[in-house]
Amino acid sequence: MSVPRLELRSDLISRQISLGDRCVWVLKDPLSQAFHFFDEAEFGILRSLAGGCGFAELEQKYRGHVESRTLARFLSSASRAGLLVSNDVATPSRWWRASPQRPRRRWWSQPLAIRLPGFTPDRLFARLPKMTGLFLDRGKAAWWDRIRARHVLIAILLLLLLACSVVGLRLDELLADSASASQQLYTAVVSSGGISGDGSISSILLIFALAVVTTKVIHEIGHAWVCSALGGRCREVGVLLLLGIPCLYCDVSDTWLMPRRRDRILVSATGMIAEWIVASIAVLVWATTQPGVLHDLSALIVMVASISTVLINANPLLRYDGYYMLSDWAGVPNLSTEAGAAVRSFFSGLFQGEATTRANPWLVLYGIASTGYRMVVYAAILWAVYTLVESRVGVGAALPITAWLGFVLMNQFIRGERRVRDDDPDDRGHGRLVSGLIAAAMMLLLFVPLPRSLRVGALVRPEGEMPLYVSTPGTLVSAEATGNVLKLDDWRLRLQELMARGRVGELRAELAAAKIDRLEQPERALLHPILQDQLSSAEEQHATIANRLQEVEPRVQPGMTLFDPPIRRATKRQREEGRWSWTGVPLRREHVGATMESGTLVGRSGHPTARTVSLFVPQESVDALRPGQSVSLGYRGLPIGSITGRVEAISTDPVDSLPDEIVASGWASAQSRADGTHPRREVLYEVTVSIDEKNSNAMVLPARLVAAARVDLPPMSLFSRWRRWMADNF
């Protein structure tokens, strides 16, 4: 074999660390900031190259211990890693591959995690307390440091124990408050992009974002502080754009130079411990505050800093804290690489018919689980990006952006696999085949008809729904309907009606007296036409007033039920002026005697049990709807699809006024006002859906219920959707 003469770089930093029951050597490249791990035999081979050596000399030295093919592959891998240098020019052999020049990685090659330049925080952490009693051996710390460390540990444990006790006693209440606060946060984000009516960012959204950023900063600072306290070095602190969200990052990879395994695991676990401390403080704030912004915010922080950090940071299937803790605990520094090699070895043995393989079973399981989970995460990210861009811009921009992002993610995955397989030339063809299959699958996905659906807001209405308004101002006499009539009264009209009735009686008596007196006084007969005209006018005026009194009392159609309207709340101006007649639901006993203004919605009448559903569909999607298409809804926490129905009718005109329930739930923006402060953002059409009979018999849906609805549309490929969007917009 013709292999160039090699020499181990003299600027490499070497440390011997413990990994379980064995010791390995770590070589740090100060130029690329990469770490490489070798066992004692491999490091001995590299150390023999400190003064330069040719392959023939090494082959002669290790003959009988290492095969020439294995030795050439090892030196080739070390050369490509940049650990070996050579000024000789020689023809490479089949097992030797020269070190290629690695291109500089651009920011767009990792769009999900764009790392901005940071700074080295050595001076910052030099001023922080070291807490040596927490991190050093008992014999190496002074007695006052050990006492101080003991107090800190006891305080942290007591805080965590107290928070766990509070959560255990009030778990149901905490979950309810968290769900309510999450709904408020979701409404603030979805309803108008987090922008309130006056153009400012919603207060709960802004405070929650600041609290989450602060929590994550504490997480990263915890890593860096503990690493510095244990004698390590935080190489860089900066800002990371994770999925477009700015986050703090701390590079503590120098932890691998620490000789003790427990120190390295502690550095990896400190971030989660710091978030648990934040969650414990948030639990105490939540337990000692009344319902409000601070109360809801504390409930959200508890969930973010406890459950989410366990599901994400402690998850060993992703390269976060849990991955490095598992890697160090298992004694496998390059856990992902070793697991991938074990999976390939296992399946190669199966395909070649070998009865046994040398692959470690738990590494095979981890490699399969990690790869599968990573694919699921990639698919979820792509789907989220596609859905978000499509809802905001359209499929014309969503498809190219998602395709580019998918290509970048798959390229990263394939490049990582190819880098691992570079040591085996026979496996390069297999890598190209896998890459080709993935690319073909992605292209085929563009042209295969895929199921599609439309998710919109739905409002459940009683069948035959009719709103009941107060046409004439009146006073509420009774909170219950009597004979399908709402008892309202207006004392002014009542007084006018009594006066008109008295006037009619007076004129009738005067006319009767004139008829009797005409025999004795013939001249009074001339008054009969005049009195008759006055009586007719008085009776007409009385009838008009009586009709107005009847209009004060709205009537419910026979066989129908009166349903409550939305809750009425006093406006800010009314509260400041201290004048409002009533709030809440109008037909309540506490409101008897209150004045109902003209135009007040006192309720809606409709069928007691029969229901219809109204969907509010955007203009760009209404063309895809047809009568008879299936519709599914979710109810009472059940997954969507619990209630099914069919499209019955589609309105030909846009909706002029959206229901208050739809606007309040965030499914549509508010309508335009006279002053233009709430411009309408989209045109919606109302689609009527009839509920299937089996669902109607099983349960009676509450009137005016707002739910998520999904309409099943005909399948269409992504390319066809993109082409249709381009044709409609250009």
Image (tube, grey):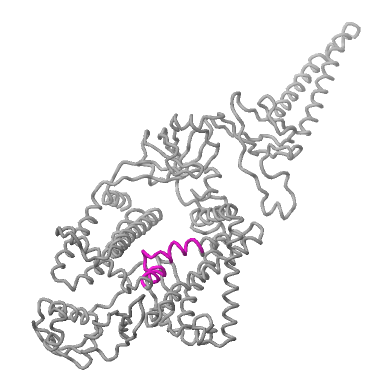
Foreground residue among 20 and 234: 20
| Percent coordinates x, y for residue 703 in the rendering | 55, 36
Which residue: 59% across, 67% down?
Answer: 281
Q: Is residue 121 left or right of residue 181?
A: left
Quadrant for the N terminus, please: bottom left
Q: Is residue 345 left or right of residue 593?
A: left
Which residue: 73% across, 37% down?
Answer: 589
Give the total number of marks visible in the rendering.
0
Q: Main secondary structure of the magenta part?
A: helix
Foreground residue among 546 and 590: 590
| Percent coordinates x, y for residue 301 in the rendering | 54, 63
| Percent coordinates x, y for residue 567 in the rendering | 63, 44
Q: Is residue 726 left or right of residue 208?
A: left
Asked which quadrant contains residue 48, the reply is: bottom left
Q: Which residues are magenta?
A: 306-327
Residue 440 sits inside the magenta stretch: no
Foreground residue among 528 and 669: 669
Q: Residue furthest top?
A: 519
Residue 665 appears in the rendering: yes
| Percent coordinates x, y for residue 420 in the rendering | 23, 71
Q: Residue furthest bottom?
A: 51
Residue 201 appears in the rendering: no
Q: Is residue 665 left or right of residue 366?
A: right
In the image, residue 651 sits, relative to residue 663, either above or below, namely: above
Which residue: 57% across, 80% down?
Answer: 149
Residue 309 sits inside the magenta stretch: yes
In the image, residue 121 sits, relative to residue 385, either above or below, namely: below
